[in-house]
Image (cartoon, helix red, strand yellow):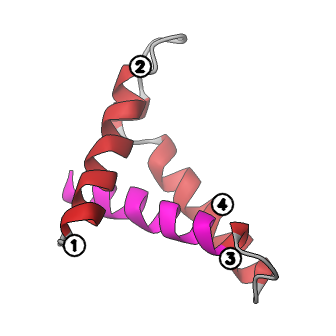
Amino acid sequence: MRQDIRAQRDWLATYRQLAAPRPRHTTALRLRLLDLSAHLLWHPFWCTPPGTPAARVELRRLAHRQEQRGTRAA
């Protein structure tokens, strides 16, 4: 699971880079975002019945919490 939390953290960081004013290397960032999105798509947290976002929110919450603490998921 730690790999997937790390992937979610990387996804958030990449998204923030793209959202910044005048981002550099946008093609590489977009490709990275797509790759991370594909990885996260197959995570068990995302395999919930349609209309059940709680598991998806939990993965994001865990990633945000680790970012706030400044820890790295190995």
What percent of the width, then of the height, locates residue 72?
A: 20, 73
Residue at the spot x=56%, y=52% of the render? 38
Callout 2 crowding tier (Cα within 10 Å): few <14, some 14–19, many ≥20: few
Which badge, 1 or 2, comes first in the chain's sequence?
2
The Cα atoms of the two marked residues, 1 and 2, are separated by: 29 Å
The Cα atoms of the two marked residues, 1 and 3, are separated by: 22 Å
Q: Which residue is mark 3?
A: 29
| In this picture, residue 17 sits left or right of residue 72 | right
Residue at the spot x=18%, y=65% of the render? 69
Mark 2: which secondary structure? loop
Mark 1: which secondary structure? loop
Placement of 64 over or under 58, stated as above or below: below
Placement of 23 over or under 57, stated as above or below: below
Is residue 42 in the magenta section? no
Mark 2 belongs to which amino acid?
A: Thr
Mark 3 belongs to which amino acid?
A: Leu
Q: Quadrant of the C terminus?
A: bottom left
